[in-house]
Image (spheres, helix red, strand yellow):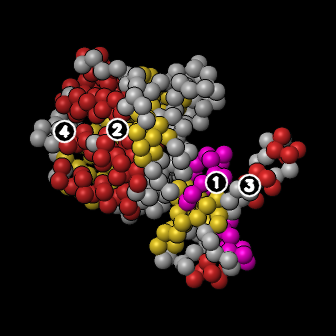
Amino acid sequence: MRKLLHELVLADAPPGRECEVRDIMIREVEPLVDDLHVDALGNVIARRKGITKKTFMLVAHQDEDWALLITHIDELGFLRFTRLVGHRWNLLGQRVLVHGTKGKKQGVVGLPAPHLIPVKEQQRGYRPEFDKMFIDCGTKTADDAQEIGLEVGQYVTAVKHFGELANNRLIGNCFDNRAGLVAMIETLRRTHQQDLGMNLVAVASVQEELDTRGARPAAFAIEPDYAIALDVSATGDHPNIKEDLIPVKLGQGPTLLKADQHHVTSQLLNAWITSLAEKHQFPLQEVVLRTPIHFGTDAAAVELEKSGSMTTALLVPTRYFHTTNSVIDYSDLEILVQLLVKCLESLDQLAKGKD
Ligand SMILES: [Zn+2]
């Protein structure tokens, strides 16, 4: 699972151009399901037949949590941009890839050497305005940029990395939401030979970071009875965050979302998941991510499609997401998969519970 997570992190999938991750999903999931297709937006929709007519959906988004779009190329060949998704304080000095028509081109979000910044400005906490920032790809003129395939409207992603920290912790880009995707694949793999109590539809959605745009048409087509979104949660276990704002910690197990900015999650699903975690002695954290925290997942989008469905979300605790260096504890991911396997093995119980 760790090797696959590494591969997924290194793939580039800004919202709306998820093809690199989509190809990996198709390769990994197709052998594990009865049917797989890709819809018009790029959602990967994989189905396994179950014993009853009810349908259970797992959804994890393919798109990543840090991406820019080129808005202008000036006469000196510098590229201006707008932020599509990601932390605005995590831009300066970043090495990036511009997805040009002649392949990806390396660049850097330029930050003047400190020697050039007047001491008074440094003392005031120098930070250039967002609209003054630029990308330097080495091009000297607008024609030069055009020559190597750079154009307005192209995506920019971070240069990716993946590594190990102490205590079984991993560092890398976009664990939001490659952690959710790898959990979904691994759960499908571990339950591959089992009969399921409901039809299972596993969706790798697109454009979650753009207001959950992909999950909506997928849910409209699938009409699930129940759905769980697999995503990440922020944590409150590092400096400068008050624990009472968000009590989630790395290494304490996956996190069950009780409510966020957009919805209150299904009490029936939450009780089912909690009882399975207790029965099998899996650590499980719980969280409410509402104001002043801004948070949402595909679960809220799925809940309201067609005649509605019961939805919730299971989250991998993740530090610093929507930056280019996020941190997870691998044990949380492993326990999430073990819990999801128990969920799929108990779908017949869930089906009876609703009746
Ligand atoms: Zn996410």
Checking the image for residue 113, the label placed there is 3
Q: Quadrant of the N terminus?
A: top left
Callout 1: SS:
loop
Pointer 1 local density, CA inside 10 Å: few below 14, some 14–19, many at least 20: few
Would you say the residues marked 4 and 1 are in contact, meaning their CB atoms lie under 8 Å apart?
no
Q: Mark 1 points at which residue?
A: 93
Q: Which residue is drawn at 56% across and 26% down?
A: 238
| Residue sitting at the far front | 115
Q: Which of marks 3 and 4 is nearer the N terminus?
A: 3
Pointer 4 local density, CA inside 10 Å: few below 14, some 14–19, many at least 20: some
State the CA–CA distance, disc 4 to disc 1.
Answer: 42 Å
Would you say the residues marked 3 and 4 are in contact, meaning their CB atoms lie under 8 Å apart?
no
Q: How many marks?
A: 4
The percent position of residue 35, horizontal first and vertical second, equals 20, 55
Q: Mark 2 points at which residue?
A: 227
| For discs 2 and 3, the disc positioned in front in the rendered view | 3
Q: What are the residue bounds of the magenta stretch?
A: 73-96
Occupied quadrant, residue 38: bottom left
Three-letter code, disc 2: Ala
Q: Earlier in the sequence, mark 4 or mark 2?
A: 4
Would you say the residues marked 2 and 3 are in contact, meaning their CB atoms lie under 8 Å apart?
no
Callout 3: SS:
loop
- The answer to whether the residue bearing label 4 lies less than 8 angstroms from the nearest atom of ligand 1 is no
